[in-house]
Each structure stands twice: as structure tokens, then as C-alpha cells.
Image (cartoon, rainbow, N blue to C red):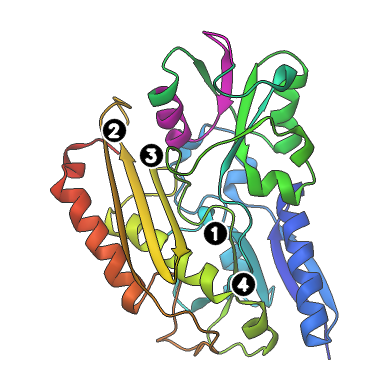
Amino acid sequence: MTPLRIGTRGSKLAVAQTTQTAERLAELSGREVEIVTVTTHGDVNRASLRVLGGRGVFATELREALSAGDVDIAVHSLKDLPTAPAPGLVLAAHPPREDARDALVARDGLTLAQLPEGAKVGTGSPRRVAQLRRVRPDLDIRDIRGNIDTRIGFVTSGELDAVVLAAAGLSRFERTGQITDRFDLADFPNAPGQGALAVEVREGFELDALVELDDPATRLAVEAERAVLAGLDAGCQAPVGVHGEFVGGELQLHAAVYDDRDPHQVAAITASGGVHVARTKLPLGPAASRGVASGAGLELAQRLVQRLFDHGVGDLTL
């Protein structure tokens, strides 16, 4: 059989996480794999993510390569994927999720609470900016871009006192030893899908290994998170945090929506409900799941979104 061609962004982190997924697929399927790198708009354009808008800037070209048959499978960081369906494509698997928390990498081993007044902290995420300003309004927050090593380099060079990154990325890139603080999800809910990967294929593509690769609990949690984002009609870079986790057999969702103008204006809601977890083979046809929750997970997400609007989220500037 011909090798499975697995597409990825060309960043070091994307290649690292795709390689891990490809090795697992090779193990499960018994087939050889080939990594194919695709350059996306977000990789080329170094403008702030606020300017780029975040809707598919790290996924469009990769999805185009998949649709064209240039690759058989695409691996994405789920938080970078728009919630709108991609015609002809389906999210076939979500491997077990990594740590969904944000992490601080700071000079001298400092935690967020220990950073001095006026400390310079870098992040490219509007959500993280709003969350940091709510907890530490004294900080001097700087907009940054770049790969993990570049961002950590801002700290080691002394240009910044700290940077905020996804703990999952630091783990996949073997940089967890540089973490000086991990943020509590109750106060710093993650971007929808953060810490999870999405394995995408064309409709009708059959590979039994995808069933084993998929983690049902991860799928249900992240689909519900993304359903909240879709219900708010917000993009990947909107100041929205949503975390889903199973507690005592129930899926709990906690969401916070921040005002882009005033971080002290926030709507935060928690909802929970029983959702059955089971591993099933997805029908990879037009009716297949495309990464937005269905059934009980969708109902829970919809209830949470309605409660957010009831608490004034419509008056916030996203």
C-alpha cells in the first residue's frame, strides 16, 4: 500500500505534534506514513493575530491541500480551526487531549503573582490579555508572535519578564521544564479546543485506525466547547474562554466572555449535564460530525450560550 500522506503546518510545533500522531497512525494501521508540510497564511503574515482575525489563518491552505487530494489526512491544532463546516471534509479523530491550561514562562522562576508591578508580559491572544488584565491590571502586556523558542527567547534575552503560552504546546515541544506557573482553569478558562488536535479527512475516506485514535471523552468535551464559540458567533481569536471536562460522569462546561474594551466587563457561566461517552465509528459522509457537538453535548452548549446572552454577553464587544 502507498504511504499515508499526512499534512501539517510547517512550524516546529505543528510538525512535532503531527509526527506524534503519524507514528500512532502507523502503529495502528500498519501502513507507512509521509509528513507533508503546507505553508499557511498565518505562517507567512507576521501581523498581529488581532489584525489577521484568526478565522482559518492557520488552516485554510492545509484544508485546500486535503480537498485537492495532495494529502490524505490533515492534523490541526483544534483551537486554530473555524467552527464553520468545511465542505467535503470531516474531523475524523481527536486524540487524547493534553493539558488545556495556559502556562507562564517567567524570568527567575517567578509566578504570575510574584511578577513585579509593571512587569512586561508577552502574548498574542486577546483572551489571555483580558484575563491577565483582570487579575493583574498593573502589568505591561505586549503583543507578540513567533514560535515557542522565539517567545521564550523574549524572556531569556531580558526583553520581556514573562510570556504566556499553552501548556500543551510546551509539553509537545519538550519545554515543560521552563514553565514557572500554570493558570487555574476556573480563572483562566482555555480557548475552545486548546490542548486538543483535530485529524481531518475527506468525506468517505476509510481508515479503521482513526476509530482507535479518537478519544471519546476528548471529542465530546471539545465539540461542546466549540459549539459555545459557534453559538456566540465568535472567531478563534475572540476573547472567549470555554472549558469542558467530565466530573462524576457528567460533562461540565464553564465559559467566560470578556469585553475587548474593558476586561472588567465579563459574563461567566457554568453548566453541566450527563453525556454518554462511547467509542464509535463515525460515518464519514455528508451527515458526519464536523467538529461541532451533537446530541446532549450540543444541548448543554446551547443552554450555556443562552444563559450567557441572558447575562448580557450581547452587550460586550468581542
- Does the magenta-highlighted stretch encompass residue 130? yes
The residue indicated by pointer 4 is: 66
Q: How crowded is mark 3: few (under 14 residues within 10 Å), some or many (20 or more)?
A: many
Q: Name the residue under label 1.
A: 78
Nearest to the observer: residue 92 or residue 97: 97
Q: Residue 257 placed where, x, y %?
A: 31, 42
In three-dimensional space, the C-alpha distance between marks 3 and 2, rounded to whole angstroms, equals 7 Å
Q: Give the quarter of the figure containing the N terminus.
A: bottom right
Q: Residue at x 62, y 27 (%)?
A: 163
- Pointer 4: residues within 10 angstroms few (<14), some, or many (20+)? many
Tell me how far mark 1 sits from mark 2, CA to CA: 24 Å
Q: Residue furthest front?
A: 248
Q: Is residue 287 left or right of residue 125?
A: left
What amino acid is at disc 3? Answer: Pro
Q: Nearer the viewer, residue 290 or 272?
A: 272
Q: Given contact means CB atoms under 8 Å apart, are the residues at marks 3 and 2 in contact?
A: yes
Tell me, yes or no, whether the two marked residues, 3 and 4, touch with CB atoms within 8 Å: no
Question: How many numbered marks, from 0 up?
Answer: 4
Please say whether residue 74 is one of the residues in the magenta stretch.
Answer: no
Point out residue 281 in the picture as x, y percentages from the top left corner.
55, 89
In the visual, does 149 lie left or right of 129? right
Name above or below for residue 196 compared with residue 175: below
Residue in front for this viewpoint, 160 or 57: 160
Q: Mark 2 points at which residue?
A: 259
The residue shown at (78%, 55%) is 16
Question: Label 2 to label 4, Cα distance in Å?
Answer: 36 Å
